Image (cartoon, rainbow, N blue to C red):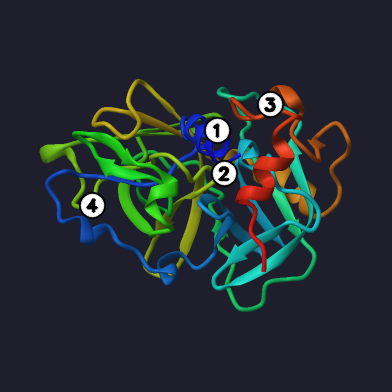
Amino acid sequence: MLKLLIALLYVFSASAHAIVIRHDVDPTQYLAKSTDFSPLATFYFDGAHGTLIDPKWIVTAAHATFCIRPNSFVKIGSKLHKVKQTYIHKSYQPGKSHDIALVELIDPVTAVEPALRYKSSDEQGKNIWFIGIGGTGTGKTGQTIDSYQNQQTLRKAQNTVLEAIGPLLKFKFNEGAQALPLEGVSGGGDSGGPAYYKDATNTYLLGISSRLEGAGIGRYGITEIYTRLSYFNAWIDRVMNQTSNANQVVTKLPPASMPAGINENNLQGVCEQIGLVP
């Protein structure tokens, strides 16, 4: 089972994301603390994230929810919280669009302030932050350490919104003079993680880690795709207010939408291996 799990996680990393960094900056500069983005939620022992946007609600990527069921545990801060239900956008198309889901908790989180949802459509050009515990490496080598090997080390990195089009945000991993001081992109292991923006007073969630375009996870020049939160704010409100209908959500991923290598025959075993437990 362990060999199967490692193989599946490797395949899953093509769409799951963490932090890959510049080759010419001290790696310790990228190390993060949980307080850098307190609303960060973690679903599995080696990653897959979401963001607390309400005391009882987490937003994440649809494809990251393959093991999230009622009574699953989610980690926020230092505490585990039980899941009540998962709501996946009915129009989710793997590798294309609508990669978004909401996770409802049984009890409200009281020790962490939820992130604010960004509601304007002017994301393009904004400098944002990524954060996560998945795989790492540098822009020259690409990802060289996977999420299992990373052992839950938390990192953060900067990037700039290259494009904001419809339901998607796009980012590029620049190098040299074009790069931000802590430029970075996602690697393998943290689907659903945040792209967040800080102004003088508040922290806003702009995007949700979805997938990459191009060859080589984490190499310079790679384009990363995040789900654009502002596009889905109305859907989020309907689900949280319980006004959505069966045509707008599903409560678990259908078999055809599972990450590559995961199917109904091995799903339970994989979830038992990577799920969080008290």
Q: Which residue is mark 4?
A: 182
Q: Which residue is mark 3?
A: 257
Q: Secondary structure at mark 4?
A: loop
N-term mark: 2 or 4: 4
N-term mark: 1 or 4: 1
Check disc 3 and give the amino acid type.
Ser
Label 3: few (<14), some (14–19) or many (≥20) C-alpha neighbours in 10 Å:
some
> x and y percent of residue 147 in the render?
43, 46
Alpha carbon separation for disc pair 2 and 4: 24 Å
Check disc 1 and give the amino acid type.
Leu
Is there a contact, CB below 8 Å, between mark 1 and mark 4?
no
Check disc 4 and give the amino acid type.
Leu
Label 4: few (<14), some (14–19) or many (≥20) C-alpha neighbours in 10 Å:
some
When the figure is inspected, residue 114 is found, relative to residue 214, above or below; the finding is below
Q: Mark 2 or mark 3, which is nearer to you?
A: 3
Q: Secondary structure at mark 3?
A: helix
> x and y percent of residue 57 in the render?
70, 59
Q: Which residue is mark 1?
A: 8
Alpha carbon separation for disc pair 2 and 3: 21 Å
Q: Residue at x 65, y 68 (%)?
A: 80
Q: Residue at x 27, y 57 (%)?
A: 30
| Image position of 105 (left or right of 157) | right
